[in-house]
Amino acid sequence: MIDVTHLVEDFLALTRRFIPRHEGIDSLWEFWLKEGRAWTRVLVRRYRETYFITGGDGETIEHPDPRRREDPERRARLRSWLESLRQWESVAARDPVGAQARLSRQLPLSARRGVLLRRNVRALLPDWLPIERDLSARELKAVLAVADRPDPPPIPAMTAERYFEYCRVAYRANPASFRGGGFKPGLAGRDYYRRFADGRDAGLLKVDPRSKEAFRRWHTSGERAGAHPWEIYRGGNSTHIDLYARDHPAGGWSIGLDAFSSTRLVETCRIAVALEKAKLPFCLAHRESYKLRLLQEDWVGVEPEGSEMRYAWQGFPQEWGVADCVQLRWIYEAHPGRRRELSSRLRHLVSWLPERVSAFRLRDNSLP
C-alpha cells in the first residue's frame, strides 16, 4: 500500500508541471478537481521549501511533514485528487484555454464565489440579518447622520475619568446586552467598565482619574501590549466592540468606536447615537460600510457549499466591501421546489468572481 507521504510527493510532482502564480515569495497552484459528482477547489501553496495543500473541508496537508501521519481518509482523498489532476493535465495539455472555458460552464453555481447586493439577499432571505429592523426609524436616521458627518476635531486633553464617561454612555445605550450580567442603571462608567469590559485593562483602572499627565504616561508606557483595554463589549476576534483613545494626527486625542461584525452593528449604532446625543466627540470606524449595510446597498459574499463561514468575508477583494456572506443552499432551502428557477436568476444576479485555475503546463524548467 502506498503511504501518504508518497501520495503527497506524487501529487506535488504533478502539480509542479503547471505554471504557478505568485503572491510575494509564495508560489500558488489552484485546481478544480472532481470527486465523483462533487467538485473540490484544491490550492497548493509553496512557501520557501514547504508546501501546503488545502481542499474541501479537510485538514491542510503540509510537506515535508515531520509528523508523517498515516490517515486513511487523507490517503483516500489524495488518491482521488491525484487521479483527477491527471485527467485535468491530459485535457489542459491539448487546449488550456478551452479547458478553462469548459470548466467554467460545468461548475455548479453552488461551487462558485461571488457577490450579491444585500437588497437582493434580503428579498430572497427576509429573516437573514434584519439589521435595520432592530433599529427604530429615529435611531436609523440618527446613525446615518453620524455616518455622513466628518470626523470631529481633536480633543485637547484626555483623562481616565473622561474616558470612563464615554464608557458610561456606551454601556447605558444597550442595557439588554448585559441583562444576564447584573446590569444596573445609574452606575459610574468606571463601575460598568469593571463589570463588563474584557478584563485585560493593562492598569487603566488604576490610573489617576483626573490627571491628564497620568493618562498620557499610561498610554505611552507600553503596558497595553498584549492587553485589551479598549474592548468594552466582550466578544471574539471580530465580534467585540472597541472604544479606543489614540493620538490625533493634529495633536490632542481622538476617541474611536470600532466594531466591524454585523452581529454587533445594532449595538454599535445605538452607542454612536448615544455618544452623539451626549455631545461626546468620537469617530465611527467603518462608517461607509455601516451606511451601505443599513441602506442595503452593500455587496454580500456568496460562498461555496461547505465553506467555513465565520471569517469568509475576509477572502473577498477589499474593493467589494464585503462584510457578510451567504450560501446559495440557504436560499434554495428557503424556497423548496424552486431551485431550478432560482438558479436561473442567480446565475445572472450574482457577480461571480473570476476563477484562477492552473491550466498551462510548465515547459521551461528555468521558471519557478
Image (cartoon, rainbow, N blue to C red):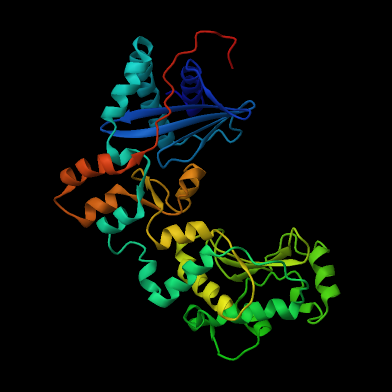
Q: Looking at the picture, how far across and down is residue 35, in whole percent?
A: 31, 31
Q: Is residue 188 visible?
A: yes
Single out the residue that lies furthest toward the top. Answer: 364
Q: Looking at the picture, how far across and down is residue 77, in whole percent?
A: 39, 32
Where does the N terminus fall, quadrant-wise?
A: top left
Q: Is residue 136 visible?
A: no
- Relative placement, left or right, of 221 versus 296 is right
- Relative placement, left or right, of 361 versus 351 is right
Say above or below: 184 vs 173. below
Q: Residue at x 50, y 74 (%)?
A: 270
Q: Looking at the picture, how far across and down is residue 307, in whole percent?
A: 39, 46
- Relative placement, left or right, of 246 versus 140 is right
Q: Residue at x 37, y 40 (%)?
A: 113
Q: Nearer the viewer, residue 315 or 117?
A: 117
Corner quadrant of residue 42: top left
Q: Nearer the viewer, residue 228 or 243?
A: 243
- Relative placement, left or right, of 58 versus 220 is left
Say above or below: 170 vs 8. below
